[in-house]
Amino acid sequence: MSVMSLRLPDEIADTLANLAKATGRSKSFLAVDALREYLAREAWQIEEIQHALKEADAGDFASDEEVNALANKWASNAR
């Protein structure tokens, strides 16, 4: 396991300490858990963007009719 040192703004350090105390978890556990979730979300987003770029490069776009149908669906659901 690697060790990493970082500087935290006081408000984040305080929130982390308070959450650790309230949950009975260590600050390290909570920080790793938060970082794990953040990295998974960012990796997913980058993967989806890369997939969309490949589709766009291949000319795989929605037709005007498909876009209008979706817009109409959302507009009618909002009422």
Image (cartoon, grey):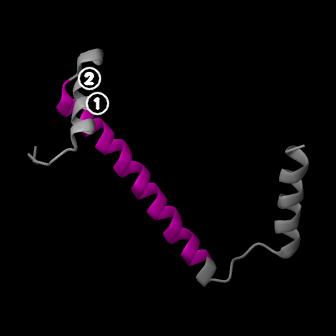
The residue to which callout 2 is attached is 18
Q: Which mark is residue 15?
A: 1
Q: Quadrant of the C terminus?
A: top right
Query: Relative to residue 62, is residue 69 drawn left or right?
Result: right
Q: Residue at x 55, y 76 (%)?
A: 53
Q: Residue at x 22, y 26 (%)?
A: 17
The x, y position of residue 10, in whole percent, is 21, 38
Front position in the image: 12 or 45 = 12
Q: Secondary structure under badge 2?
A: helix
As shown in the figure, which amino acid type bears the numbered disc 1?
A: Thr
The x, y position of residue 5, in whole percent, is 10, 47
Q: Is residue 48 magenta?
A: yes
> Magenta region's main secondary structure?
helix
What residue span does the magenta drawing correspond to? 26-55
Q: CA distance from mark 2 to mark 1?
A: 5 Å
Query: Relative to residue 45, is residue 14 drawn left or right?
Result: left
Q: Which mark is residue 31?
A: none
As shown in the figure, which amino acid type bears the numbered disc 2?
A: Asn
Q: Residue at x 39, y 49 (%)?
A: 40
The x, y position of residue 62, in whole percent, is 76, 72
Q: Residue at x 62, y 79 (%)?
A: 56
Badges 2 and 1: C-beta atoms under 8 Å apart?
yes
Front position in the image: 6 or 44 = 6
> Which quadrant of the view contains residue 52?
bottom right
